Amino acid sequence: MHSAGWRRPHLAAVAVLVALACPIWAAPAPEDDSLKKQALALNDVTGEDAIKGQVKSLLKDAAGTKKMLAVAVTMSKEKDQPFSYNALYILARTAHDLKDYPAAETFYRLGSQQAMKLKSGTKITQTYGGLIDLLYEMKKYDECEKLCKELLEVPDEAVQKLQLVVLRRIIMAQAKQNKFDDANKLVDGLLKAAPDNWVVLELKGQVQREAGEFTEAAKTYEGVLDKINNDKRLKDEEKTELASDIRYLLSNVYLELKNIDKVSEQLQALLKQDPDNPTYNNDLGYIWADHDLKLDEAEKLIRKALEQDRKQQKKKNPDLKDDEIKDNGAYLDSLGWVLFKQKKYKEAKEQLLAAVKDKEGQHTEIYDHLGDVHMALGEKAEAVAVWKKAVEVVGDTKREQQRKTEIEKKIKANQ
C-alpha cells in the first residue's frame, strides 16, 4: 500500500476510526432487525396449507428472502436457536427451492433433530426426505445413502410406508458412487419379492444406465412399457402419463447407443400425444440438427419449443410482463446450433450468447457450440477463450468428460 507517510491523527478522527473498526459498539442495522422479526414470525405459522402458502410467498421475493435466510442461519447458530419446527421447515424448503443449499442443509438438519424429539413420523419424513433429496442434488451421495439407512431404522409407521421410496434413493446413491454390485443386489431382491412390479424394473433400468449398460437398459425400459400398458390397475390416462415418462427415458438411452432412428421414433410418439410440449419439441429438433437431419423442420420444432415455454411461464405466473419472460438457455442453444448447421453463423452467435447469459445455460456443451461459431466467423481468440470456459464448467459424467477431451484438442490446435 502506498502512503504519504505516517501522521498522528486528530483525536476526533481517532474516535471515528475506532467506531468504524469496532462495529460491535454500533446499534444493529435496522434492516437486520426487520429480517430477524420476519424470520421469527415464521414460528407463528401453523397448518399444512399455511406452511405451503408461506413458502410460496417467500419465493416471490427471492432477493429479499435470500437476505432473510442469511440472517436466519446466523440466528440458528445461537446457543438456544429460536426457531420452532414449522419455522425450520419453512426456512429449509424455501432455501432448497432457491438453491441456497448450505442454508437448506442447516435448517433441514435442525428440523430433523426437532422432529425426532417430537417423535412425529410426518415431521421426520418431511425433514429427512427433504435433506435426502438435497444431499442427492448436491452430489453428496455417500451422506445421502447413510441418511437413508438411518431413516429406515426409525420405528414409525409413517416412515415405514415410505420404505420403497427410501430404498430407491439408496440404490441410486449407490449407483452414483459406482457401487453397482450393492445397487443390483438391492434391486434383484426387490424384483424377487415382486417380479411384476414395473416400478422396481424401471429402477433396474436406471442402474443399468448409470453403469453404462445401455443395450440392457433399453431392453429393460421396453419391458417396463409393456408392464405399464398391461397393468389393469391403471387408468388409461395414468398409463399414458407413465408410458410417456418411460419413452422419454428410452429416447435418452437410444441416444447413448447412437441409434438416432430409435430416438426419433420415441420423441415423435411423444409429440403425437403432446404436440405442444417444449421439451419434446426441443429435443427432437436438437437431435436432428446435431446429426444434420431435416434442418428446416428441426428449426421449426426448436422455435416452437421456445414459444411454448414462454406461454407456460406466462400461464404459471400471469403477472409476468413480456420483457420479464426469460428464454430457456438450453432451447436457445438448440436454436443457435441448428442455425450454425445452416451456416447462419451471425444469427447462431446471437442465440448462443443469449444462452450463456442464462445461469442454467453456462454448460460445457453450450460453450463448446459457441466456440465453434466463433471459429466459423474467424474469431479464433474468442473461440479459444470460450472453449477454456467450457473446460472450467465441465461436469463429471462420462459424456462431459469425453467432450472435455475433444475441446482440449481444439484449444491445443488453435493456440
Image (cartoon, rainbow, N blue to C red):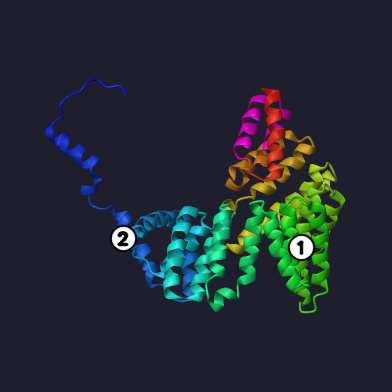
Q: Name the quadrant containing residue 362.
A: top right
Mark 1 vs 2: CB contact within 8 A: no
* Residue displayed at 52% across by 72% down: 154
Give the image location of residue 255, x and y in percent.
Answer: 79, 49
Picture disc at residue 285: none
All told, the count of numbered labels is: 2
Instruction: Please provide percent x and percent y for residue 37.
Output: 33, 63
Q: Is residue 241 visible?
A: no
**Residue 245 at x, y percent in the picture:** 74, 63
Which residue is at a point 57% across and 54% down the rendered structure image?
A: 142
Residue 389 seen in the current view? yes
Residue 18 in the image: state x and y as whole percent: 19, 39
Q: Is the residue 301 above or below the residue 399 in the image? A: below
The residue lying toward the viewer, choosing from 110 and 84, is 110
Q: Residue at x 80, y 60 (%)?
A: 271
Q: Which residue is mark 2?
A: 79
> Which is more N-terminal, label 2 or label 1?
2
| Left or right position of 72 against 120 | left
Q: Secondary structure at mark 1?
A: helix
* The residue positioned farthest toward the top in the image shown: 4
> How packed is label 1: few (under 14 Cα within 10 Å), some, or many (20 or more)?
some
Question: Given the image, on which type of amino acid does mark 1 rest?
Answer: Ile
- Tell me the amino acid under the disc marked 2: Lys
Magenta residue check for 369: yes
Residue at point 62% right, 57% down?
173
Q: What segment is highlighted magenta in the picture?
A: 368-393
Taking depth in this image into account, of 259 and 213 the one nearest to the observer is: 213
Q: Residue furthest left?
A: 11
Quarter of the image for residue 45 reads bottom left
Q: Which mark is residue 246?
A: 1
Q: CA distance from mark 1 to mark 2?
A: 49 Å
**Quadrant of the frame with the C terminus:** top right
